[in-house]
């Protein structure tokens, strides 16, 4: 087979790399001040750590009658009086100007013209198939840097709020939340001048502290999050003003979508940034955003990048992983340890290094497991291995900006099945 050219992978790596290093730096800084820096992700049931709960507290987790740790919540009086939307027109105007400028960039790109605009970086002309439209993305990015403001609600206390895991499979949740906590560039303390409002809860943390592995009451998510939304909607006018449409939540947990079920406005109106971006679970790409799942086992990010360009790779395709979900059984049934070129394992044999296998391979098979997202996709990109995505109903991360077809192969499960049948016949 012809060697696959991967001219854009390095750019993807750069984007992911920059994002991760910025957020990791933040994670390290914030976790020094926080009790959960070394959190492991076994479910923790805090029955021994009981603190008195104040039943009058509107944010105590109502209905949790078991011996549960209840977290005190700091109250902040509203800074804005009801009905006081002084800056809203100004914000809307700024946004329309930005939209117009982005449209101009699109028009210029269509005619392949250079534009001089105060919103252009004179030293850089965006290009590359990696993007859906490099100039539009660049313009929009510069505008974001100039204009975009996020307000982070201060309500809610550690460890369920303002904090998240910086390690393992859900690490992106922690990276992002911690980034929002410490950010100075985009975060505004003046809610009136914000474009969006961030709800700083961590689904992973809520489950880690409040979800009982035996009782398995998933409604802890509902209680915690609807309580939180009730508090901020009573205390500030912004939630009611837009019915949540300018509010953002983020989760990398498989139950991220479920966490938003319990508040209809959050589910249907708000911007949900999810790793589990399954359109069959009502992920709505018109308002929601898909976020990459990255498994940072140790929280360490150096030495992740680099791949088959360094090796004289001999392996055509590689996969190693458990038989989860509907797609993987067929993969393993047909290929498991049967082929020299297509290396498919359920469990890697002793002495074979997972990362090195990826780096040596040309194609890395990334089938959906229990959930649509898989950390393999980013691992393949880090390893400079072309991701072969086999999934259904999955909206790929940043796919409004990045042209995934330029550096990955996407196969639907039915096509995959047909291909497998064909290989059987041969
Ligand atoms: C909760 O915080 C308030 C304000 O800091 C404090 O007065 C109160 O005693 C705290 N309650 C508990 C149960 O820790
Ligand atoms: C646009 O600007 C770049 C760099 O300044 C230059 O290389 C390119 O030729 C210009 N293109 C057009 C169509 O003027
Ligand atoms: C927002 O609406 C809810 C329910 O309709 C109400 O209880 C709350 O007081 C309202 N919040 C504000 C700030 O008016
Ligand atoms: C890869 O192959 C080339 C040419 O066959 C050889 O010169 C080079 O040393 C090899 N590199 C490695 C890392 O084996
Ligand atoms: C996507 O969601 C649907 C509906 O809940 C579910 O049946 C399917 O298994 C999900 N896909 C994956 C890969 O988990």
Image (cartoon, rainbow, N blue to C red):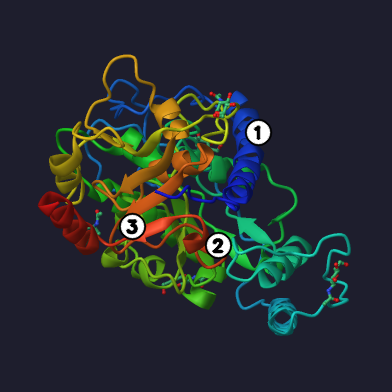
As drawn, is 93 to the left or to the right of 316?
right
Q: Name which of mark 3 and mark 1 comes first in the sequence.
A: 1
**Crowdedness near tag 3: few (<14), some (14–19) or many (≥20) residues, C-alpha within 10 Å:** many
Q: Name which of mark 1 and mark 2 comes first in the sequence.
A: 1
Residue receiving disc 1: 25
Q: Which circle, 3 or 2, is nearer the viewer?
A: 2
**Quadrant of the displayed image that contains ligand 5:** bottom left
Pointer 3 and pointer 1: residues touching (CB < 8 Å)? no
Residue 15 in the image: state x and y as whole percent. 62, 49
- Relative to the observer, which residue lies in front, 394 or 200? 394
Observer able to see residue 161: no
Q: Is residue 27 above or below residue 197?
A: above
Mark pair 1, 2: CA separation: 25 Å
**Crowdedness near tag 2: few (<14), some (14–19) or many (≥20) residues, C-alpha within 10 Å:** some
Observer able to see residue 271: yes
Residue 412 in the image: state x and y as whole percent. 27, 62
Residue 423 in the image: state x and y as whole percent. 17, 51
Q: Is residue 399 above or below residue 3?
A: below
Q: Which circle, 1 or 2, is nearer the viewer?
A: 2
Of the numbered discs in the image, which one, if any, rests on residue 257? 3
Q: Residue at x 75, y 60 (%)?
A: 145
Mark pair 3, 2: CA separation: 23 Å
Residue 416 in the image: state x and y as whole percent. 23, 57
The reply to whether the residue tagged 1 has its Cβ within 8 angstroms of ligand 1 is no
Of the numbered discs in the image, which one, if any, rests on residue 402? 2
Badge 1 element: helix
Q: Which circle, 3 or 1, is nearer the viewer?
A: 1
Q: Is residue 391 above or below residue 317?
A: below
- Relative to the observer, which residue lies in front, 162 or 129? 129
As drawn, is 108 to the left or to the right of 152?
right
């Amino acid at each position: 087979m012809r060697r696959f050219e991967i001219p854009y992978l390095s750019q993807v790596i750069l984007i992911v790399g920059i994002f991760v290093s910025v957020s990791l730096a933040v994670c390290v800084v914030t976790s020094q001040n926080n009790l959960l820096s070394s959190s492991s992700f076994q479910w923790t049931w805090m029955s021994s750590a009981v603190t008195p709960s104040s039943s009058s507290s509107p944010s105590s987790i109502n209905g949790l009658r078991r011996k549960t740790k209840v977290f005190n919540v700091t109250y902040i009086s509203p800074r804005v009086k009801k009905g006081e939307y002084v800056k809203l027109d100004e914000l809307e105007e700024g946004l329309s100007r930005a939209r117009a400028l982005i449209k101009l960039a699109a028009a210029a790109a269509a005619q392949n013209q250079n534009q001089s605009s105060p919103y252009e970086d004179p030293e850089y002309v965006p290009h590359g198939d990696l993007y859906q439209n490099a100039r539009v993305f660049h313009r929009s990015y510069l505008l974001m840097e100039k204009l975009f403001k996020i307000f982070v609600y201060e309500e809610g206390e550690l460890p369920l709020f303002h904090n998240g895991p910086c390690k393992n499979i859900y690490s992106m949740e922690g990276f992002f939340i911690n980034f929002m906590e410490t950010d100075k560039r985009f975060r505004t303390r003046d809610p009136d001048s914000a474009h969006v409002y961030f709800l700083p809860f961590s689904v992973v943390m809520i489950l880690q502290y409040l979800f009982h592995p035996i009782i398995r009451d998933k409604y802890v998510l509902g209680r915690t999050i609807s309580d939180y939304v009730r508090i901020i909607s009573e205390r500030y006018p912004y939630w009611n003003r837009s019915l949540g449409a300018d509010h953002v939540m983020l989760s990398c947990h498989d139950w991220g979508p479920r966490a938003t079920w319990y508040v209809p406005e959050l589910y249907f109106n708000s911007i949900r940034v999810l790793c589990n971006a399954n359109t069959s679970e009502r992920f709505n790409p018109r308002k929601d955003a898909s976020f990459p799942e990255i498994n940072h086992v140790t929280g360490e990010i150096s030495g992740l990048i680099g791949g088959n360009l360094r090796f004289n790779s001999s392996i055509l395709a590689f996969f190693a992983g458990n038989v989860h979900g509907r797609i993987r059984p067929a993969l393993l049934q047909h290929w498991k340890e049967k082929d020299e070129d297509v290396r498919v394992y359920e469990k890697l044999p002793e002495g074979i290094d997972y990362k090195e296998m990826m780096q040596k391979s040309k194609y890395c098979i990334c089938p959906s497991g229990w959930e649509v997202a898989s950390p393999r996709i980013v691992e393949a990109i880090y390893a400079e291995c072309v991701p072969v995505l086999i999934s259904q109903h999955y909206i790929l991360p940043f796919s409004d900006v990045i042209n995934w077809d330029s550096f990955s192969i996407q196969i639907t499960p039915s096509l995959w099945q047909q291909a497998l049948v064909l290989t059987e016949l041969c």
